[in-house]
Image (cartoon, coloured by chain):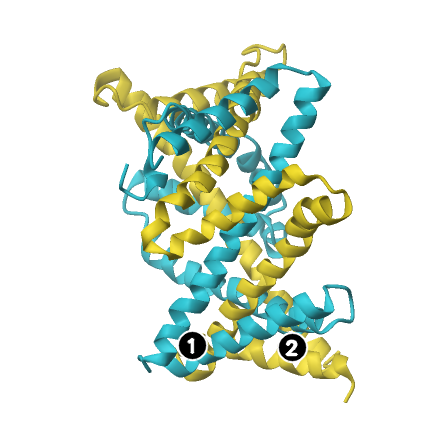
Amino acid sequence: MRKTVPLTIVFASGIFMLAVFFVPHRRVQDTSQVLLEWDLVVWTCALFLSGLNLFIVNAKKVRRKERDWGYKVVLLVAFLTTLVTGLAWGVRAGTPFMFIYESMMRPLQATMFALLAFFISSAAYRAFRARTREAALLLAAGLIVMLGRIPIGDMIWHRIPVITDWIMSYPNMAAQRGILMGASLGAIATALRMLVGVERGYFGGEG
Amino acid sequence: MDLTILSTWIAAFLTLAILSFLYKDNPVYKFAEHLYVGVSAAYWMVYYYNNAIVPNLIDRLVRDHRWLYIIPGILGLLIFTRLIPRVVWLSRWALAFYIGMGVGVVIPATVQAMLVAQLRATLVPIWTGNVGASIVNILVVVGVLSVLVYFFFSREHKGALGGVARLGIYFLMISFGASFGYTVMARISLLIGRFQFLFYDWLHLR
């Protein structure tokens, strides 16, 4: 029950979805659509579990008055308020949930990502010292692409945007294609290992 | 007070709170950081409740009376046994369904979109009759092959294999540099967006 059932479920559902790709029959396609809906429900429940876990972990820290527990209270209040407003009033424009989204989540998210601009730049300053040929190539490509995306690049030399497009379209694409092919072979191998029950990481180390 | 003004002021305060981290880690930043974690976790839960659970479970059961949809409901509930150590093994059934579906979808999709499509795009004529286009095609073919050779670890990268792998590294470095430049510019444009919000929408400095 603890091992055979999950391994059987993985194999059966995996083989069926693989077969769907080769069988265009309407009933098979309809069944696969139903299964995909079920899959989304299970995935969403896993997301709910992660939210619940976030709540439990932080509530414990508040109860034990651990370090920075006051901030955990902020987290819990924000979490519960957003959840309750979303479930009680819905997510249409003008609801309290959308007010929280517009006034809190959107600016916080955008500023968090914008903040990364500074940290990427400072990391680059340390990492991009052209000590080797490889580092020099990295530095040159990065600088050209950055200059090619802003008006000053065009003002320095009108061909910089053209070179940027060329780098993005050819050497960059060639390398990305190689990475994609390598990654896809790895993904297929891992998927096959899971399908036949060799890879059992999802057992949580008890397989 | 007009809700739009209140929303702008809250957004401006939170924007400045996050930017204050550039000076150093401080209580105002920590407040905004924890607020962000709480709000975004609940936001995605509400989003998926409305877009996944309601149409694919509740509507199917309550409106359409398709009782077979009790199965994903039960599987979904089994996920929560992760929190009960005595019956934690039951959560594997739900995970197994999710993983099996993922595996079945990923294999053909990956072969089709990532392997065959990329191979087809790479298998181009070396000589096209136009020198510029031919050089570009050769560059792409050599780039893809050398990067693939670099990722081939079954033999030591020595001799000719080592030389080709080194060429692959050069292509990878150009690609990483280009991706880096692209990412930095995307982040900078977000930063410009935040400053535009602060100067135009909040302070009205137009």
The colour of chain B is yellow
Which chain does the numbered disc 2 sit on? B
Classify mark 1: residues with Cα within 10 Å, few (<14), some (14-19) or many (20+).
many
Q: Label 2 amino acid?
A: Leu
The span from disc 2 to disc 1 (Cα, nearest Å) is 28 Å
Q: Element at badge 2?
A: helix
Location of residue B116 with respect to B38 vertically, above or below = above
Closer to the camera: disc 2 or disc 1? 1
- Across and down, in percent, residue A61 comes to 35, 75
The colour of chain A is cyan
Image quarter hosting the N terminus of chain B: bottom right
Q: Which residue is mark 1?
A: A72
- Across and down, in percent, residue A140 comes to 43, 45
Q: Which residue is mark 2?
A: B198
Q: Nearer the viewer, residue A18 or B75?
A: B75
Which chain does the numbered disc 1 sit on? A
Q: Residue at coordinates 78% horizontally, 66% vertically from top-left?
A: A93
> Does residue B1 appear left or right of residue A44 in this picture?
right
Q: Label 1 amino acid?
A: Lys
Can I make out residue A48 in this image? yes
Image quarter hosting the C terminus of chain B: bottom right
Label disc, if present, on residue B60 of the rendered structure:
none
